[in-house]
Image: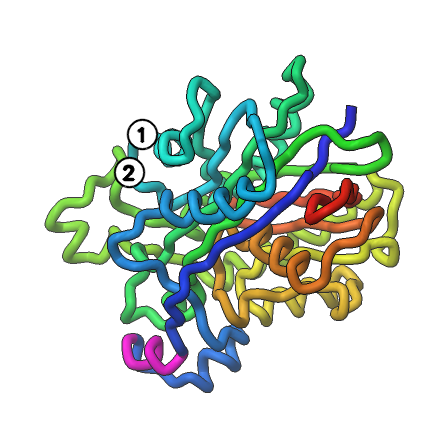
Amino acid sequence: MTVGILDIDYHVPPTEVSNDTISAWADTTPEWIVDRTGIRTRRYAHTTDPTSTLAVAAARRLLDRHQADPSAIIVATSTPDHPLPATAAIVQGILGFRDIPAFDVNAVCTGFLYALRLASALVRDDPRRRPVLVIAADKYSTIMDRSDRRTVALFGDGAAAALVGPVPDGSGLLAQQLVAHGALHDTVKVPAGGSRQPIDARALEQGDHYFKMNGRGARDYALNTLPALVDDVLRESDLGVGDIDRFVFHQANLRLVEELAVKIGADPDRVPVTVDRFGNTGAASVPVTLAHSHRERPIAHGENILLAGVGGGLTGGAAVLRWHRTGGSDG
């Protein structure tokens, strides 16, 4: 049995945060932000809306089109509502599903690709072949140090939801690869808030409850790791770069997406971009970009799509998907 994405949709909050606003926070200029990142605006959720609100909004857009009976709910996030319970459990309750398992996956910006692999296994293991609801959602606006121009300019909030289920042979997920390199875990982190370092007065004073990133280290990891992962999944799929109709990369920043396209040999016209208008939405970045591209130009039956990204951990992942269109907005 082959498993694929049956349908996908996304949600970004309506409030735009401009480069003028970021510049005022971080003592920089809009020109510096565009030059270094290619980002012109990003979306922020309301301060009282947790990550689960974004996740539910994306899921409802999807479920409004389907009478889905999912066998499980997986939420990929690194900004959960609480340290515990899982945000997926909260989402399950709000959506009104009962009894089915619901759990979170934290591979930071690679979270959707990790969740997709897990969902594939769950579908194959289910005698009823029910779909799995995979949601990727992050609210990075809550963990930004607004005085740090290197990070606050990059991130926005958003969510995407996908139904993952059986598709005919020859379609669906043709190859998937995941990696982690934990020796590099300090490259991207929020130091405080876990069992290693609580959020106490000292952590607050030092800003250790905020997101921190070695930007050069993260960039080098992406440029070294992703091309190798892309080669692996293309080889496994028996496809070449020229056979891919859309390259959906993690939207870390526009300059990195452009570098990756050149290094991999991807036609820029086949590389959808959302980071310029939504910012880096973390785990939601890859599926938001896929869903936005589908909304702008519906994916045709039989299109080959490559998904690839890196995230904190450090983690990486890639997948090749052949779209199966069943009618309507399904893919």
Count of numbered marks: 2
Query: Residue 192: horizontal and vertical position, in percent?
Result: 26, 45
Q: Nearer the viewer, residue 7 or 312?
A: 7
Q: Is residue 298 above or below residue 185?
A: below
Residue ID at (65%, 59%): 295
Q: Find out whether residue 319 is within the magenta segment.
A: no
Query: Residue 110: horizontal and vertical position, in percent?
Result: 55, 45
Seen as rendered, the residue at the extreme left is 201
Residue type at the position of mark 1: Pro
Indicate the quadrant where residue 235 lies: top right
Indicate the quadrant where residue 255 lies: bottom right
Tell me whether the residue at label 1 lies in contact with that at label 2, contact meaning CB atoms closer than 8 angstroms: yes
Quadrant including the C terminus:
top right
Residue ID at (48%, 50%): 159
Residue, disc 2: 82
Residue type at the position of mark 2: His
Q: Residues within 10 Å of mark 1 (few under 14, many from 20)?
A: few
Q: Find out whether residue 24 is within the magenta segment.
A: yes
Q: Is residue 120 above or below residue 301?
A: above
Q: Is residue 291 left or right of residue 79?
A: right
Query: Residue 280: horizontal and vertical position, in percent?
Result: 49, 61
* Structural distance between the alpha carbons of marks 1 and 2: 6 Å
On residue 201, which mark appears? none
Say whether residue 19 is visible: yes
Name the chief secondary structure element in magenta.
helix
Residue, disc 1: 85
Quadrant including the N terminus:
top right
Q: Nearer the viewer, residue 63 or 253?
A: 63
Secondary structure at badge 1 equals loop
Residue ID at (22%, 57%): 207
Q: Read off the magenta span.
A: 19-25
Residue ID at (26%, 57%): 47
